[in-house]
Image (tube, grey):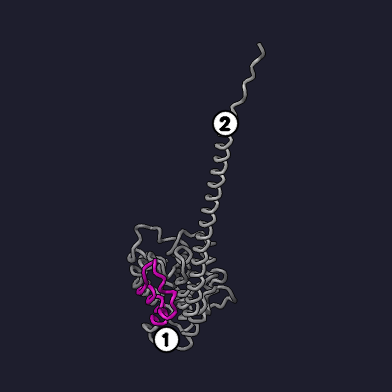
Amino acid sequence: MPPRFVLPDVSEKNREGKRTARERLAAEREKQKAGERRRRALIVSSTVVCVLALAGVIGTLAANAGNGKADPEGPVRAPSKATGGDSPAIPVGKESARSTLTVWEDFRCPACKSFEDAYRSTIHELTDSGQLKVEYHLATLIDGNMGGSGSLRAANASACAQNAGKFPEYHDVLFQNQPPETSDEFADNGKLIELAGKVDGLDTPTYRKCVEDGTHNSWVAKSNKAFQAGGFQGTPTVLLNGKNIYQDRAMTPAKLKRMIEESDKS
């Protein structure tokens, strides 16, 4: 009996081939769809980034156009009678005073306002009596942490007030009218000039030009650099004759006054 040959099941192979082809086609289509989705997502995200970037540029240009220069680059122009060299300061009080209070402050800093509100009258009393001299160092810590330029502009405006011999008065006005920390109202030179109107004789054409030109911006930047290099924990930092007294939880205006009076007698 001759051997039997079993013919291969051609129809089964055809079905298998067609199924494999369909699967490959489906996979290819899904791959194309995924690529198209990624492409659309990339276009959308890129558009959003561009729009946000453009909005930022427009906002910056508008702010600069309305408020003058905020760029701290340029020649360092110290205000009148500034001291400190590489650690710039504005001195208040008589040079002959035996005690020196070194104060690092930021005009946007809420804790600095709290310090000023609590100690202002005592410090004025002691400087007026000749017992204390104060060295005010200006920092721009909040600008760096929160964004904006209010710390820089307010510090420049206070340096402009120093040129007019009105720094202590304007310094107090700024803290008494400090906006919320998250608000950058001091970035508006118009606001700073408006507040200068609260100090007799300060709002003059010379003063306005100094504020609007950012005359002392680079000097303020130099002061802030000294603050960063000093390794201080934050603002305010208050030193009496080199000793940090702000960290003393038992410190009060009365205790500060007593310490200075005792130093004056020794």
Helix, strand or loop at label 2? It is: helix
In the displayed structure, would residue 94 be above or below residue 227?
A: below
State whether residue 34 is above or below residue 174: above
- The N terminus sits in image quarter: top right
The circle on residue 41 is none
In the rendered image, the quadrant that contains the C terminus is bottom left
Q: Callout 1 environment at 10 Å: few (<14), some (14 to 19), or many (20+)?
A: some
Seen from this angle, which residue lies furthest front? 1
The structure residue drawn at horizontal position 62% and vertical position 21%, both measured from the top left corner, is: 6
Q: Main secondary structure of the magenta part?
A: helix
> Is residue 69 inside the magenta stretch?
no
Give how far across and how far down residue 28 sits, in percent: 57, 45
**Closest to the observer: 190 or 125?**
190
Which x, y percent locates residue 206?
A: 48, 87
Out of 241 and 216, give the one closest to the viewer.
216
Residue at the right extreme?
2
Mark 1 and mark 2 in contact? Answer it, CB < 8 Å: no
41, above or below 68, in the image: above
Q: Which residue is labeled 2 in the image?
A: 11
- Identify the magenta region: 168-195
Disc assigned to residue 203: 1
- Label 1 or label 2, whichever lies nearer to me, is 2
Q: Kindly identify the amino acid type of the residue bearing the numbered disc 1.
A: Asp
Q: Amino acid at mark 2?
A: Ser
**Residue shown at the point (59%, 35%) measured from the top left:** 17
